[in-house]
Amino acid sequence: MNHSTITVKTNVSGGIKKVWEYYTNPIHITNWNFADPSWHCPRAQNDLRVGGTYMARMEAKDGSTGFDFEAIYSQVAISKGFKYEFGGRNARVQFNVLGDQIEVVITFDAENENPIEMQKRGWQNILDNFKTYTQSN
């Protein structure tokens, strides 16, 4: 079992209420939840409670490939963060208020199929998309 963890983070302006809403509401998730411009997130569902399920469909825009990212929440603290389990791995998402910025920090268990740097880049790209989308809407 791989015990390596990866952390990605960004600072987003917009206030905690907006940042939390844009990160957790499926209406917004579908606009930013992809690592590359050739991909998209056509649908998402989020039952944000302990034991609730998060699901996001990620697929290539040309329809050549895709997958469902599914997770079960193990901890939820509204406007502060949450933890979830996905495929035997865990992730923690924290929202830290730093003046007029919200620091979003994601720490997740690495998987064994892809290099650590590739995994970090993919998750960071998604987080960067989130920041761009949130600050421009």
Image: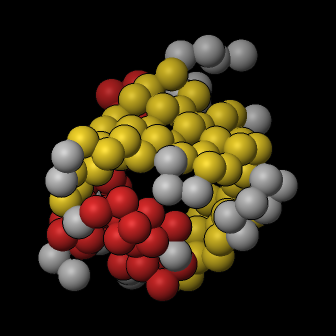
Where residue 99 appears, as percent x and y from the top left, is: 20, 46
Front residue (pair 74, 80): 80
Answer whether residue 30 is visible to the viewer in this image.
Answer: yes
**Position of 135 relative to 113 (above/below):** below
Q: Residue furthest front?
A: 99
Question: Would you say 12 lies left or right of 127 here?
Answer: left
Where residue 100 appears, as percent x and y from the top left, is: 18, 53
Question: Would you say 94 lies left or right of 120 here?
Answer: right
Where residue 29 appears, as percent x and y from the top left, is: 45, 73
The quadrant of the image that shows the C terminus is bottom left
Answer whether residue 124 is visible to the viewer in this image.
Answer: no
Quadrant in the picture for residue 84: top right
Front residue (pair 83, 13): 13
Where residue 28 appears, as percent x and y from the top left, is: 42, 79
**Position of 103 relative to 128 (above/below):** above
**Position of 49 relative to 59 (above/below):** above
